[in-house]
Image (cartoon, rainbow, N blue to C red):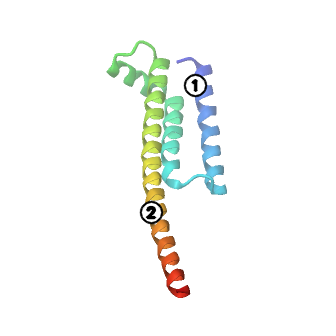
Amino acid sequence: MTPQFQAFMFLGALLLLITIFLLLKKGMMTIKYSLLWLGLAIALVVFAAFPYVVFVLRDLLDIQMPVNLVFFLMFCFVLVVLLSLSIAISQLAEKCKRLTQANALLEQRVRRLEEEKRG
């Protein structure tokens, strides 16, 4: 791993950490979802500060170049984030469906009560 790439990873991780903390402070991101991103930033700091870890993982996974390992791990991370967001969207869609059904039932009750009151 070249020193330029290490510096790029380190700066990118620091920028990511700062961005996550700013988003948390402004309330634009919940702690639940920030944990994944904090984990990525910490992993990038570890990889940048201790490139030996990358070389050991590279040898264990039998990957030719350490940079390929880093990109592979980032790709896996993106898949995990997509999976967690898909789960969250599915849960929100189900809640929205239940709220819509409950709202329709309440509207029906209100109409029925208004009709009984008139009649």
Residue displayed at 57% across by 25% down: 6
Residue 57 vs residue 21, the one in the foreground: 21
Could you classify mark 1 by the number of other residues whose Cα lies within 10 Å: few (under 14), some (14-19), or many (20 or more)?
some
Residue 50, percent from left and from top: 49, 30
51 relative to 16, above or below: above
> For the residue labelled by badge 2, is the local secondary structure a helix, a strand or a loop?
helix
Q: Which residue is mark 1?
A: 6
In this picture, residue 117 sits left or right of residue 73: right
**For the residues bearing labels 1 and 2, Cβ distance under 8 angstroms:** no
Which numbered disc covers residue 110? none
Disc 1 residue type (three-letter): Gln
* Residue with the mark numbered 2: 101
**Of residues 9 and 22, which is closer to you in this image?**
22
Disc 1 element: helix
Rendered view: 39 above or below 76: below
Q: Quadrant of residue 7?
A: top right
Against 63, is 30 above or below?
below
In three-dimensional space, the C-alpha distance between marks 1 and 2, rounded to whole angstroms, equals 53 Å
- Which of the two marks, 1 or 2, is nearer to us in this view? 2
> Disc 2 residue type?
Gln
Spot occupied by residue 82 in the image (x, y as percentages of width and height): 46, 38
Residue lying farthest front? 119
**Residue occupying the point 43% across, 37% down:** 80
Q: Which residue of the protein is positioned furthest toward the top in this rendering?
A: 64
Q: Residues within 10 Å of mark 2 (few under 14, many from 20)?
A: few
Q: Position of residue 74 (x, y in %)?
A: 48, 29
Tell me where residue 44 appears, x and y as whole percent: 52, 33
Q: Nearer the viewer, residue 36 or 88?
A: 88
Q: Residue at x 58, y 29 (%)?
A: 9
Query: With 25 as the anchor, is 95 left or right in this view?
Result: left
